[in-house]
Amino acid sequence: MLKGNMFTTFYSKDDIELIHESVLRVFEEIGIKIEDEEALDIFRKHGARVEGDLVFISKELLDKALSTVPKSFELVGLENKLEIGIGKDLVVAPTNGCPYLEDWDGTYRGVNSDDLENFYKIINTSDVYGISSMVSADIPGFEDSPTESALAQMAMLAKYSKKPVYNILGVTPHNYKRGSAKEGARECIQLIKKYMDNFDDYVCYSGMCVLPPLTVGGDAIEHYMAFAEEKQPITITTCSMTNMTAPPSLMGSIVADFANMLAVGVLIQLKEPGLPIIFSPFSSITDMREVRLMTGAPEFLMMCLGHIAMGDYYQIPIRCGGALADGFTYDYQAGVESTLGALTITLTNGCILPHASGDLSNFNLLSFPKFMMDEEMLRYMKRLRQGVMISEEKASIDLLKKVGPRGNFLQGRTPKDYREETYLTSPVFNRGTCNEQGRAAAGDILTRAKAVYDERIASYQLPDVTKKQKDILNAHLPKKYQY
């Protein structure tokens, strides 16, 4: 089985110590800009040096705060529970947030609520994804919501999700008009609690991006505070661009980003000790020719590995990598880039592989074909994460003695070892014989992916819920999606 980090050669112990020392220098010599008075008061109360809106965190305060960070936690869904964290099985989560779509016929258009419904059906009929997440947000289809668009989108996620949920939606004046971002985020969380009739467990987690370099914006802090007050797990995200919102060097970006995330981690632990946090870095290089984030670049993997190494050092769960791509369609380029990003977390101690399917053009474009093709690639990733089974029995010495040199192992029924350790079934990829008959039977990958998609959409069934649960969601869902 996979143990430890298979990419340790990228960062030595001395490398990690130097990054750690550099983070401490950021805290002591530069500070982190915190754009929220309540958060500044929390830091002051616990002895941090605060100058205006700059917070300086001592090593002692850092160590004290991080001592309460849990290594894992349990997230409860409608039909199952999920262990997330260091030492737990890899959790695969679909993408979230993309505004545009590559459809099956090759056309490009904006994502709408009907697309969202279909994505939820695919996610919740999959053997790959452990979490259902808000694939796209603030899209057409929620204009006539009975209450607020933010609540309608949360209700939509809940209606179609049998699995634990991840809510990426940011509450803004556009989608929540009757209060602050903190009030809106809390109301979204309370909606899930009421629907689940569960006010004691962790029933949803969410993230918000800090404002690099070395800043935590007021809107982000309001979301963090909301989840802390509702006692739900928090993902702390950063997505900086080298030579733009991060230093030009890869190490400089890792230092600045990790300091930024750590500052929020400290804040959360000071406010609500023991609340689960996950660091979620998606920073990468900038293509200065177009001033464009490049998540399909090899440097993206290298930077993610640096953050994973630091997560191991501080014993904080890490969620990063993903099947991200710079390309604009489901071609060879996108396949290479997405597999590279998925390997980042698969072969390390990372706990969640996010943005695991369908992403193109750096978080901007969703693709139905790529979503289904990525799902098969993710089965490969899950097989890699299992590793090689090592034991005296698995060494097969007795069997080797029995068969001997130049013998063969084709005897009787297919052995248990072969069935346990060999992944063959592939509904989308073609792994058959390459002859004229085999090629004709297989068809192309787009045809196979569409057939799987159609079957899954047709087979989807809504979760079996009570009238009370239906009424809770109907109060927020647009009429078209009400029970």
Image: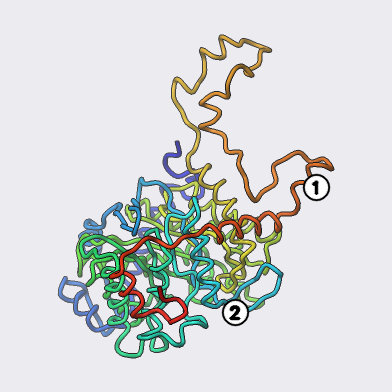
Quarter of the C terminus within the rendering: bottom left
Q: Quadrant of residue 67?
A: bottom left
Q: Which mark is residue 110?
A: 2
Number of numbered discs visible in the structure rendering: 2
Q: On screen, 468 above or below 77?
A: below
Disc 1 target residue: 440
Is residue 303 among the parts visible in the rendering? Answer: no
**Position of residue 457 in the picture relative to residue 230 (left or right):** right
Q: Residues within 10 Å of mark 1 (few under 14, many from 20)?
A: few
Residue at the farthest right position: 436
**Which is in the foreground here, disc 1 or disc 2?**
1
Q: Nearer the viewer, residue 174 or 321?
A: 174
Alpha-carbon span between mark 1 and mark 2: 35 Å
Q: Nearer the viewer, residue 140 or 186?
A: 140
Q: On screen, 48 above or below 163?
A: below
Q: Quadrant of residue 188?
A: bottom left
Colouring mode (rainbow / by chain / secondary structure / one colour): rainbow
Q: On screen, 80 above or below 385?
A: below
Q: Which mark is residue 427?
A: none
The residue depicted at 51 percent of the width and 76 percent of the height is 113
Mark 1: which secondary structure? Answer: helix
